[in-house]
Amino acid sequence: MFLPAARRRRPRPSRPDAFSIYDPVHFGIDENGQAVTVTLMYRNLLTGGEPGSGKSSLLNTIIAHAALSTDCRLWLFDGKVVELGLWRSVADVFVGNAITDALDRLRELQAEMDTRYRLLDVAGRRKILRSDGLDVILCVIDELAYYSVTIGTPAEQDEFKTLVRDLVARGRAAGIIVIAATQRPSADIIPTSLRDLFGFRVAFRCTTDSSSDIILSVGWAKDGYSAKNIRPEDRGVGWLLAEGGIPRRFKAAYLDDGAIRALIATALLIRGGNGAAG
């Protein structure tokens, strides 16, 4: 084991209901009623769509899996506070609507990433493994546009975008997974150079073909895979694009507030009751 003892996974009770972030995450079901699962380890995910289209359902499902995983830390960024706020008690870091806090935390995450790469370099390794006993960090950002174009000075917004881009580009092998969501799929929020760094993308209902393509990649709408064609009443329905594949239509699993509270209670037992550090 190449990691110093201080950086290894925190001891937690062994429970049969605990998950691992290395395991596939249940996203929902496809049009044939088959389960849709995605392995997020060593990957990042971008999702977008109009308000009420299903982004929150997918984020809550992913966070639920991570919260029940004994090998994962949760870093949550929520400009509206209330979208991910229920998970605050089980998060290791929770950032609300302050750009200065968001930047401070992203800098910390970047520093942790650099430290992990130095350890890997010394060990002659290219990525962390489950057997290393190092917690994976799941960084969830909802809503991306809030921090990148709405609040703060232009310099702060630019730094936020630069930090996110660096984490998405380099974090995977160091055990840092970025999940980013936006209800404004536009080129100024998600430039091509950033979108193409995300291995997995999910487009929920969008108002235009171009907005759908901004999430999935240019050309998919022309080929018939457009989130514009999802009916407004089909909440939670979206297109999932995995690396090198073809978009797959699915319906995201839904957790109501009661189910989330029950999951949090279990997660707190698994995690030993740790609360958000920020």
Image (cartoon, grey):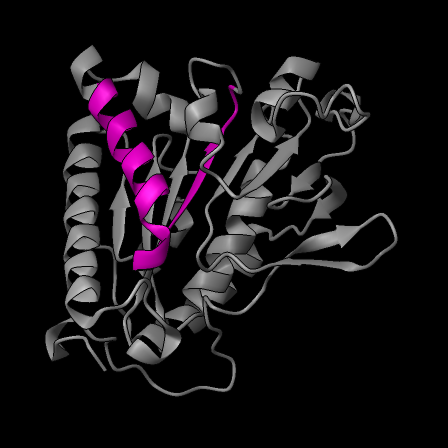
What segment carries the magenta color? 157-184
- Viewed as shown, does residue 108 lie left or right of 262? left
- Position of residue 207 relative to residue 272, above or below, is above
Location of residue 1 in the rendering, given as x and y in whole percent from the top left corner: 23, 82
Q: Quadrant of residue 38?
A: bottom right
Residue lying furthest right: 32
Residue at position x 76%, y 54% from top? 29
Residue closest to the eye, 82 or 26: 26
Residue at position x 64%, y 14% from top? 210
Residue at position x 18%, y 33% from top? 103
Residue at position x 32%, y 67% from top? 128
Residue lying furthest front: 124
Residue 222 in view (yes/no):
yes
- Viewed as shown, does residue 99 lie left or right of 220? left
Residue closest to the eye, 24 or 55: 24
Location of residue 273 in the rendering, given as x and y in whole percent from the top left corner: 28, 71
SS majority, magenta: helix
